[in-house]
Amino acid sequence: MLKVVDETKKAFLTGNETIAWAALAAGADIMFGYPITPQNEVMHYWTRLAPRYGREFLQTEDEISAGFTVCGAVQAGKKAFTATAGPGNVLMQEPFGMAEAMRLPLFAIIQQRGGPSSGTVIYSQQEVALTTYGGNGEGYRIVYSSASHQEIYDYTIKGFNMAWKYRWPTFLLGDGYQAKMREPLEMYDPEEKGIKIEPTYPLVGLPGKIGEDREPQHLCNIYSLEEELYDVVMKLSAEYESIAPEIIEWQEHHCEDADIIILTHGIVSRAADDAVKALRAQGIKAGYFRPITLRPYPAQQLRDAIAKSGAKTLLVAESSYGQFERLTKQEIYGETIKMEHLYMPGVGIIDYDIISKVKSVL
Amino acid sequence: MSLVRVALAGEGGQGVQSVAEILAEAAYNENKQAIYIPNFGLEQRGGVSIAFIQVSDERIGAPKFNKADVVIAMSERAVGRTAGYSDSNTLFVYDDGFNVDAEELPAEAKQIIGLPAVNTANEELHPRVFNVIIMGAVIGLTNMVTFEAAKNALVNKLGHKFENNPDLRELNFKALEIGKRMAEEALREGVAK
């Protein structure tokens, strides 16, 4: 395979362009997609770049089909992915659910836009609930919420790897700002950095006679009996829970002595980081906690941060109306820390917003 | 260099986003941290287009901001649309040929600057380099990138056009220089007042 990034180099790109490069560097074979703002340029850049490296693209008739063609391609052993947003993410819940049921190594990029419905084409963090627990299942998903173009590059590569290593559908949750803004990052060849690229393999059409040479490959998303499904779901749950500790990622700083912990994810955590610096400079003991994986959620890590700090207040700031706070509450049930929130659905949050909120609740 | 925040606004087709992209690219090429984000919506044309640029030596936080160090309104409609980005630390720039009611100008600004950019472009250069005059003005007001870096970034972006028509290179460089000087003079006058 033709090398995509010969040597580590700096680049100044949009987030969507970064995804296309990272997918190439990760060895993705094919993208299936259907246009929707703000992810369109993932497709644009991919279609421009992919032929140079012998990779492929198919535009499907809608998002349902884009999701299912990814489900099909990964069963054929192809490293396949898609990208969508907003109503497209809603439509893809059906194939995402299939990927959960059949343990398919599907990888999808979600660039959140405003909702409900078509909302705006611009920005939000309103696809948290949908991306973590969407579909008629139990949320067997790995969801990375990125905050910079470097992370977009890193976690796109990692996302493919985790999908193929653990065989759960895996998501990079970005947003319209990250999609469209330009900022510097470092592009690298993953193997040069010592990152092992997980091998792909076909899940169907395997050699050998069933019953003699091998067990049947049972990729199933429908069962005749309630009890059958019960057994499957209990097994899936146990498997998901057992690997969760290996997958969980988070960032924290200044929590040791914090009076208030600011909890954010994704791009809002950049504003939180600045806010903590500014508040500390003013003598206010603020701490920073950010789940990188929203699913599985770093629940124990957040509980530990609350315990060691003795903080009185947990401030949740998000560009949605409580989706992230609800996700957090179910994960840290029983904690008695006072919770405050800054909900700014569909609009950006800057350090000033968080600083003002902190001062109003302390 | 500490953080510099610039909001550029104008009509679709005026080259607002191109100028912002070239400036951000120039800053990046000087090893600065830079973020550029366009506002984007459903309208492909006909609306006021805004570009948000931030340049710093240190890691930059949120991609958008509420108040800018410099706001440049490149059209009459853009004046009212961007007045809200101005506070007592902001240099608010518009064209002195615009027909703008006083109440559309920002209530708060460090200095409100009217530049003869449209007129200069039309009379002395070419209407199409109006946006490059504005780019020069951003540099004159902020020093967010060096003049050389801006020239190089222009060449990167427009090099193929310059090759086809070498006069364009000189025209653009001249526009950049005039814009920078225009802004520097306005700043000096502002201090003198």
Image: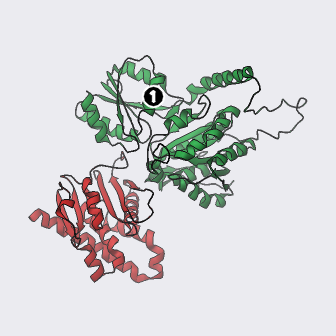
In the picture as drawn, the residue positioned furthest to the front comes out as A117
Q: Quadrant of residue A336?
A: top left
Q: Position of residue A118 (x, y in %)?
A: 49, 48
Q: Residue at x 46, y 40 (%)?
A: A126
Q: Chain of mark 1?
A: A
In red, which chain?
B
Q: Position of residue A255 (x, y in %)?
A: 36, 26
Please state which of residues A89 and A32 is positioned toward the viewer in this rendering.
Answer: A89
Residue A221 drawn above or below residue B125: above
Please state which of residues A284 and A226 is positioned toward the viewer in this rendering.
Answer: A226
Q: Colour of chain A?
A: green
Q: Quadrant of residue A96?
A: top right
Residue A312 drawn above or below residue B109: above
Can residue B16 be seen here? The reply is yes
Q: Position of residue A43 (x, y in %)?
A: 58, 55
Q: Is residue A237 left or right of residue A348?
A: right
Q: Is residue B112 left or right of residue B10?
A: left
Total labels: the figure holds: 1
Residue B186 drawn above or below residue A283: below
Q: Quadrant of the C terminus of chain A?
A: top left
Q: Residues within 10 Å of mark 1 (few under 14, many from 20)?
A: few
Amino acid of disc 1: Arg
Q: Is residue A66 left or right of residue B107?
A: right
- Element carrying mark 1: helix
Q: Position of residue A325 (x, y in %)?
A: 42, 30
Q: Is residue A97 left or right of residue B117?
A: right
Can residue A157 be seen here? The reply is no
Residue A82 drawn above or below residue A276: below
Where does label 1 land, which residue?
A326
Color theme of the render: by chain
